[in-house]
Image: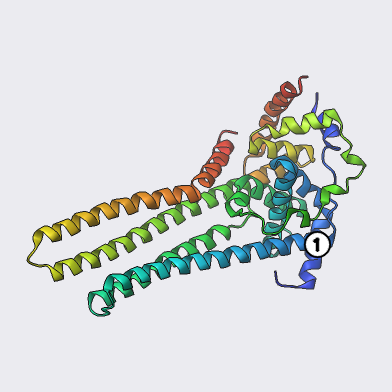
Amino acid sequence: MSRNPAAEREFLARIEQNQGILYRVATLYARGVEERRDLLQEILFQLWRSRDRFKGEAKLGTWIYRIALNTAISGLRQARRRPLAVPLDELPQAESRPGPATERDPRKDALEAAIRELPAVERALVLLHLEDRSYDEIAEILGISANHVGVKLTRIRHKLRVRLGE
Amino acid sequence: MSWDDLRSTWRGCTPPGELSEEEIMRLLEQRGDEIRRQVARRLREEAGYGVLLLGFALVASFGDLSGWTLGYLLLSGAAIGLLIGTLRHQARRMHAVDLGGNLRQTLQSLRDRVDAATRAYMSAYIVVILSLLGVLESAIVAAHRDRPALIALGAASGLVALALAWWSGRRYLESRFGHWREQLSHGLAELEHL
């Protein structure tokens, strides 16, 4: 990767504000620590590759969601995937420094598991809705109509209720 | 259970990102290095195939570098170049897809490019095989004009080789892109039925 300090600073500032998005997508679309790190790395790489294409027409968060979800759902990671050439323990240990939020709560675990069981696109829909994205924004990220978003979310909520046993 | 209930549960589901700037840059550099290594390995593999084919042609010529043999050698080189160039170009196209578009556009675009890569590779592969078989058959005809049975046997063998090449090409493409294409189609179907 060629060094360009100004570009690096700008990129890092963008990521800094939105790291939560990357983690949430990686958590819902990959299983296990190794796969999550792999997906996180691929999303970061795709964001870096696309950094010059972000012109500010959309919100930064929307753009990051697009790239993260497109990377996760399109399977680009598996298409490129080769055995990691670096030992896994050399990768950053992001999850080895948990904050207070990582304390296990059965309700949270159950919700995460229920969302993971949904098909990939429905998972994206739920994730974006839980993250307070507007219907228009969700429609823009997924390429569907805003009317569809509301209808589909009602059905998904029912599915989640059944899965959560409520 | 309302969306607000779910949302309040969700808030604590995943920890906020804690990667430092150095860790992010290190992850990116590792990914860049990994890709460079993949490219170098692929180059070595492709060069290996080229050497193998040219070696085969040399052995087949029994040291006689003239006429048909020289033509065969040149054609082999051009054929390998055509195949490698096709694969390279299509791989570049696939990985140059703009992921900043919406999900539907991205999945559609990737699937179109996978299909285009499959078609281009198959066409190049068959053109290469046909050309090589054509040269070999011409050599047989030139050397054994008075032996129609041998010429017919050569032609029949060529057809069998062509069929095998077609089958092996499809198998190769299926193993390389089949699963990915299926995943892309599945995502698009899901969007359609949403």
Q: Residue B159, percent across and down? A: 24, 54
Residue B65 against residue B26 in the figure, above or below: below
- The quadrant of the rendering that contains the N terminus of chain B is top right
A25 or A145: nearer the viewer: A25
Q: Residue at x 60, y 51 (%)?
A: A76
Amino acid at pointer 1: Leu
- From where the camera sits, is residue A159 visible? yes
Residue positioned 75% across, 73% down in the render: A4
- Of residues A62 and B120, which is closer to you in this image? B120
B97 lies left or right of A166 = left
Left or right of A76 in this view: B143: left
Q: Is residue B84 left or right of residue B79?
A: right
Which residue: 46% across, 67% down?
A: B48
Compared with B66, A73 (above or below) is above
The residue under label 1 is: A12
Identify the image's colour scheme: rainbow, by chain, secondary structure or one colour: rainbow
Residue occupying image coordinates x 71% and y 23%: A158
Determine whether the residue tagged by mark 1 lies in a helix, strand or loop.
Answer: helix
Residue A130 at x, y percent in the picture: 78, 37
Viewed as shown, does residue B113 lie left or right of B148?
Answer: right
